[in-house]
Image (cartoon, rainbow, N blue to C red):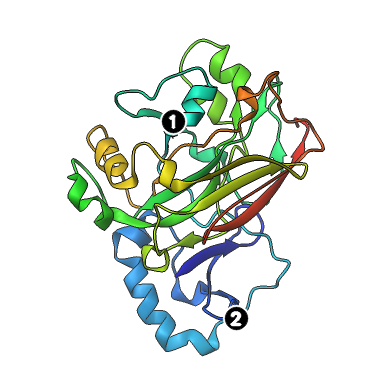
Amino acid sequence: MKLIRKGQPGEESPGLILKDGQEVEISGFGEDYDEVFFETDGLQRLGEWIQQNQNELPIFPEEERYGSPIARPSKIVCIGLNFDDHAAESGMEIPEEPVLFFKASSALCGPNDDLVLPRGGDKTDWEVELAFVVGKRASYVDEKDAMQHIAGYALHNDYSERAFQLERSGQWVKGKSCDTFAPLGPFLVTPDEIEDVNNLNMWLKVNGKTMQSSNSSNLHYKIPFLLSYVSQFMTLLPGDIISTGTPPGVGLGMDPPVYLQAGDLVELGMDQLGSSNQKVVGSK
């Protein structure tokens, strides 16, 4: 299944993209795509409900805004320096253990919403990433069992304000959590619809120029290991998002560095996970 949520911010309705490409609303199902939905076998229950109601579902207007395909999760966990060549362009080595950091859940937004530059920042950077969503509670999960805990995959742009992240004292979270810094979607794809999650091309453009082009096969730490690893340190709740890291081509790694300015257009996409775009606007 491909799960979507459409509508104005804070008023999104859950829906699906059917096999024929139609985008239908499932408000009659009575649940949003949140922790409770995933924890109570929501995907299976929804699949059964769709079989009975598919011909009666209202169609979303084509121009309706996409929200995040996941209602606000308890946490967004990100993996740093997970592509060998990205670590090299950052002047770092792949760590012996994955680097973990958080993005505030308030950074989550729709895939095509504007990117709002933060006040006091002047080094906002892009990062195309493959994200996966936790499908059931995960604590001390063995790697061999990790895939049983995954609800699906989505396209994510892990925006970073490098001045906050690297030039201010403390942890990276300050440069990762600004409003609009986590556009997710346009949809969440369940694992049964992904032929090989370890072979997905990904790309990102700024003002039409390709900045990042890679493949999920280049992830240093793979998805089953990552879910297992993170679950050793915290309980992952259904609906939580884990973003797996970005390939080379970020603005920080250029000589001289290149950062986003108001008026820029960022476009990104990934095989089988769709595409998104964000217009850059000044701070509010």
Question: Which amino acid, mark 1?
Answer: Asp
**158 or 272: nearer the viewer:** 272
Indicate the position of residue 142 as horizontal and vertical percent values.
17, 45
The mark that comes first in sequence, 2 or 1, is: 2
At horizontal 55% and vertical 20% (from top left) the residue drawn is 165
- Residue 274 lies, with reference to residue 83, above or below; the image says below
Indicate the position of residue 222 as horizontal and vertical percent values.
33, 43
At horizontal 49% and vertical 77% (from top left) the residue drawn is 28
Indicate the position of residue 44 as horizontal and vertical percent values.
32, 72
Indicate left or right for 69 with 163 as reference: left
Mark 2 vs mark 1: give the one in front.
1
At horizontal 62% and vertical 23% (from top left) the residue drawn is 252
Whole-Å distance between the Cαs marked 2 and 1? 46 Å
Instruction: For residue 157, say whether it is visible.
Output: yes
- Which element is circle 2 on? loop
Which residue is denoted by mark 1 in the rendering?
Answer: 84
**171 or 98: nearer the viewer:** 98
Instruction: For residue 136, say whether it is visible.
Output: no
- Which element is circle 1 on? helix
Which residue is denoted by mark 2 in the rendering?
Answer: 58
Quadrant of the rendering where the N terminus is positioned:
bottom left
Question: Which amino acid, mark 2?
Answer: Pro
